[in-house]
Image (cartoon, rainbow, N blue to C red):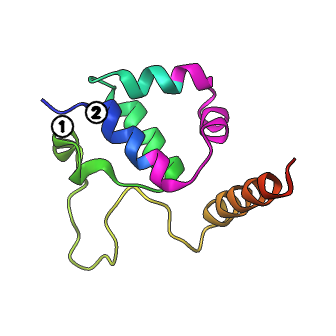
Amino acid sequence: MQHKGEIVEKAVRQSGLPLTQLAKRMGKSRRWLYNAFDNPNLSIDHILHIGAIIHYNFSDDIQDLQRFRILEDPRAEENSYTVPSESAEYWKNKYLTLLEKYNTLLGG
């Protein structure tokens, strides 16, 4: 059986989005995120919500999500739950991540 929380944690950490920002966007606490990462049966709704925020499609990683996969349109360029890189939300997230790294480097 797959440990959904561990799969989600790996993707979140690879995204570079700080846990504080993710928790804030979800309306949850950091403690909730850590508990979610420890949960082998994390709900599909939470997984999809996290995936939308970090721009990651979990349907290839989590077997239960394959049932919820959107039917592929052969004419569509991209079939995923992610937001296109041209969107304002994507660039806002990228900016906030870089700003936090910059502030960390400055020691603040």
**Residue 9 position in % (x across, y down):** 41, 39
**Quarter location, residue 70:** bottom left
Magenta region: 12-32
Q: Nearer the viewer, residue 41 or 77?
A: 41
Contact (Cβ within 8 Å) of mark 2 with mark 1: yes
Q: Is residue 53 left or right of residue 103?
A: left
Q: Is residue 24 left or right of residue 65?
A: right
Circle 2 is placed at which residue position? 4
Q: Which residue is found at the position 64% from the left and 38% from the top?
A: 25
**Quarter location, residue 67:** top left
Q: Which mark is residue 64?
A: 1
Q: Which residue is found at the position 56% from the left and 54% from the top?
A: 16
The amino acid marked with disc number 1 is: Asp
**Lower position in the chain sequence, tag 2 or tag 1:** 2
Mark 2 lies on a secondary structure that is: helix
Mark 1 lies on a secondary structure that is: helix
The amino acid marked with disc number 2 is: Lys
Image height check: is 7 above or below 105?
above
